[in-house]
Image (cartoon, helix red, strand yellow):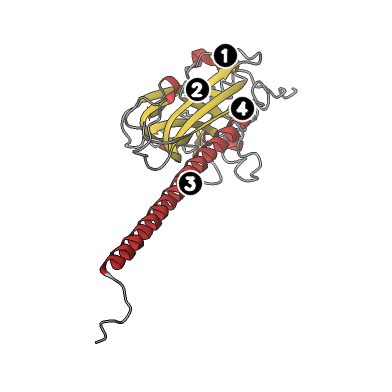
């Protein structure tokens, strides 16, 4: 062995190893930073997408509220564009399936009862409400609407549908988080609920169909204004407050959507709730003008 051959001393080896480790640590830190940035972008994009879906659905249905509700100016028809209005939930009615050649007639053509015609089935009475992810908590909301009677007809599609009779029934929306501003306190689910056309389902507890639209929703809130821009206190859903609901010409909606995971290193200074304070949020506010409110058809000539 040639002991005089060139090579690395112990000090040089230690320095080289230390530099290599330092470079590796820097690279790992950069990779972790990139990973966190990517995850943050993914979480933010997901929350924005859920907020967008919820906003588009609510806005679309509210723009249709009132259309076809009174197509012939029939006297005594209790149908309303806004069937229920609370601080954290809303129920509207409108001819949502007018562009569907089949759905627009079934069961509408056969349920008119004492009226010349009917354009809105029970499935076109739509509610937007927030419920707890765990399926617990909340309170029952009720509204009055002409949705069921003892008089029924079997449609060509085979559905046993209730004829309209001009009398309102009380519809229950259970376990809704509809307090002041609709605050859920924890992670809630935004639902689009509609009523059953099939009369056989009424009285079975299955007359309301709940379709989840967005999860991780912290709050849902509505404000109501008349044509002059004056704010209207939420009138609820009782038939006695129908006149107040008829004044609603514009609805302001706001929802707050949580990102999919909390950020332990960040605290929302505006959120006092420890359950949601570490979640970054998307705050979506929008207003909808109710174009169909107050539209009435002309009575048939006789």
Residue 131 vs residue 79, the one in the foreground: 131
Instruction: Name the residue carrying label 4.
Output: 288
Q: Of callouts 4 and 2, which one flags the residue occurring earlier in the amino acid sequence?
A: 2
Instruction: Name the residue carrying label 3.
Output: 41
Eye-nearest disc, 3 or 1: 3
Q: Of callouts 3 and 2, which one flags the residue occurring earlier in the amino acid sequence?
A: 3
* Residue displayed at 33% across by 35% down: 135
Instruction: Name the residue carrying label 2.
Output: 84
Mark 2: which secondary structure? strand
Q: Of callouts 1 and 2, which one flags the residue occurring earlier in the amino acid sequence?
A: 2
Q: CB of mark 1 within 8 Å of CB of mark 2?
A: no
Separation of marks 4 and 1 at Cα, in angstroms = 14 Å
Neighbour tally class for label 3: few under 14, some 14-19, many 20 plus, Cα within 10 Å: few
Residue 265, image x and y in percent? 35, 38
Q: CB of mark 4 within 8 Å of CB of mark 3?
A: no
Residue 129, image x and y in percent? 45, 30
Furthest residue to the front? Answer: 4
Q: Of callouts 4 and 1, which one flags the residue occurring earlier in the amino acid sequence?
A: 1
Q: Of callouts 4 and 3, which one flags the residue occurring earlier in the amino acid sequence?
A: 3
Neighbour tally class for label 1: few under 14, some 14-19, many 20 plus, Cα within 10 Å: some
Instruction: Name the residue carrying label 1.
Output: 231
Eye-nearest disc, 1 or 2: 1
Rendered position, 202 above or below 252: below
Separation of marks 3 and 2 at Cα, in angstroms = 38 Å
Quadrant of image for the N terminus: bottom left
Eye-nearest disc, 4 or 2: 4
């Amino acid at each position: 062995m040639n002991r005089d051959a060139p090579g690395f001393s112990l000090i040089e080896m230690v320095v080289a190893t230390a530099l290599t480790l330092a470079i590796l640590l820097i690279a790992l830190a950069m990779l972790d930073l990139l990973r966190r940035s990517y995850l943050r972008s993914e979480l933010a994009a997901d929350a924005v997408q859920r907020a967008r879906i919820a906003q588009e659905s609510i806005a679309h249905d509210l723009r249709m509220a009132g259309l076809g509700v009174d197509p012939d100016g029939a006297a005594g028809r209790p149908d309303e564009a806004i069937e229920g209005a609370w601080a954290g939930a809303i129920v509207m009615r409108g001819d949502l399936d007018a562009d569907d050649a089949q759905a627009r007639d079934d069961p509408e053509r056969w349920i008119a009862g004492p009226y010349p015609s009917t354009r809105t089935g029970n499935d076109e009475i739509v509610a937007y409400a927030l419920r707890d992810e765990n399926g617990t908590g909340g309170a029952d909301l009720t509204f009055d609407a002409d949705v069921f009677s003892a008089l029924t007809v079997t449609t060509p599609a085979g559905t046993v549908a209730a004829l309209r009779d001009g009398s309102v029934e009380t519809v229950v929306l259970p376990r809704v988080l509809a307090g002041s501003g609709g605050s859920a306190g924890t992670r809630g689910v935004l639902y689009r609920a509609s009523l059953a056309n099939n009369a056989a389902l009424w009285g079975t507890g299955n007359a309301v169909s709940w379709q989840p639209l967005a999860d991780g929703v912290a709050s849902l809130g509505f404000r109501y204004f008349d044509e002059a821009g004056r704010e209207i206190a939420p009138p609820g859903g009782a038939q006695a407050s129908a006149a107040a609901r008829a004044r609603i010409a514009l609805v302001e909606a706001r929802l707050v959507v949580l990102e999919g995971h909390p950020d332990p290193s960040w605290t929302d200074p505006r959120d006092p709730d420890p359950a949601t304070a570490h979640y970054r949020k998307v705050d979506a506010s929008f207003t909808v003008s109710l174009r169909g409110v107050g539209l009435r058809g002309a009575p048939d000539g006789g």
